[in-house]
Amino acid sequence: MSRLPLHTLETAPEASRPFLEKSLAANGFLPNLVASLANAPTALETYLSVGAINGRASLTLAEREVVQITAAGIHGCGFCVAGHTAVALKKAQLPEALVNDIRDQRRLSDAKLDAVAVFTRAVIATRGAVSDAEFTDFKSAGFDDAAALEVVLGVSLATLCNFANNLSQNELNPQLAAYRWEPKEQAA
């Protein structure tokens, strides 16, 4: 059960309703993340606005989904791993084995996508203060300065939705059940 109220179009604060309508139209259902973010209209607006901006980045959809799934896995957000797994498989048309490797934080068979995953992990681990070698490796994989900043943008989007889900303890919507993911136990 979610810790925060899950709003509907009828119960949401007035300022959240246009954003709920937009999400419902885009998804065909109201993701529990959005329903819980509706408790804070500015948080919901930020999530949807930054998501739309991230969608205009020079990174491909597949590369953006690598950032989102990698960050969600690190942040332990099963809801976001599931949601972005659906996007990676259905919209980005990534192979299931590759998506499973992203979810499990393993090396990826696609060198360019692996560079995105490795750089994303470095950005999170160092809070953006990646080493010169990590930055050079990312750029050597065919990325530029803008792409590096777009990884940071993707991590910022992921942080908002991952942390909001972790705070809310949102249950997975039935529409995402096939993509369920649970964080692996961390060694002490």
Image (cartoon, rainbow, N blue to C red):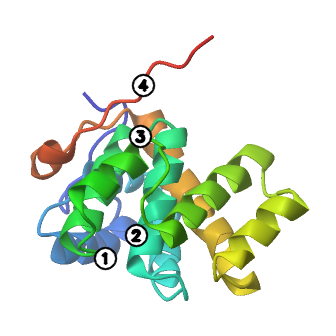
Badge 2 marks a residue whose secondary structure is helix
> Quadrant of residue 94 in the image?
bottom left
Residue matched to label 1: 18
Mark 4 or mark 3, which has the lower sequence index? 3
Please rate how many residues cluster around mark 4, counting C-alpha atoms within 10 Å: few if below 14, some from 14 to 19, many from 20.
Answer: few
Q: Which residue is mark 4?
A: 184
Q: CA distance from mark 1 to mark 2?
A: 7 Å
Residue drawn 41% across the image and 53% down it: 37
Q: Viewed as shown, does residue 32 lie left or right of 37?
A: left
Asked if labels 2 and 4 touch by Cβ distance under 8 angstroms, the answer is no
Report crowding for label 1: few under 14, some 14 to 19, many 20 or more residues within 10 A (C-alpha): some
Q: Amino acid at mark 4?
A: Lys
Report which residue position mark 3 lands on. 104
Asked whether the beta carbons under mark 1 and mark 4 sit within 8 Å of each other, the answer is no
Q: For mark 2, does the 10 Å Cα neighbourhood hold few (<14), some (14 to 19), or many (20 or more) residues?
A: some
Determine which residue is flagged by label 2: 15
On the question of residue 70 being in view, the answer is: yes
Tell me which numbered mark, 4 or 2, is placed earlier along the sequence. Answer: 2
Residue contact between numbered discs 1 and 2, judged by CB atoms under 8 Å: yes
Chain-order first, disc 3 or disc 1: 1
Tell me the residue at 63%/69% (across/down): 151
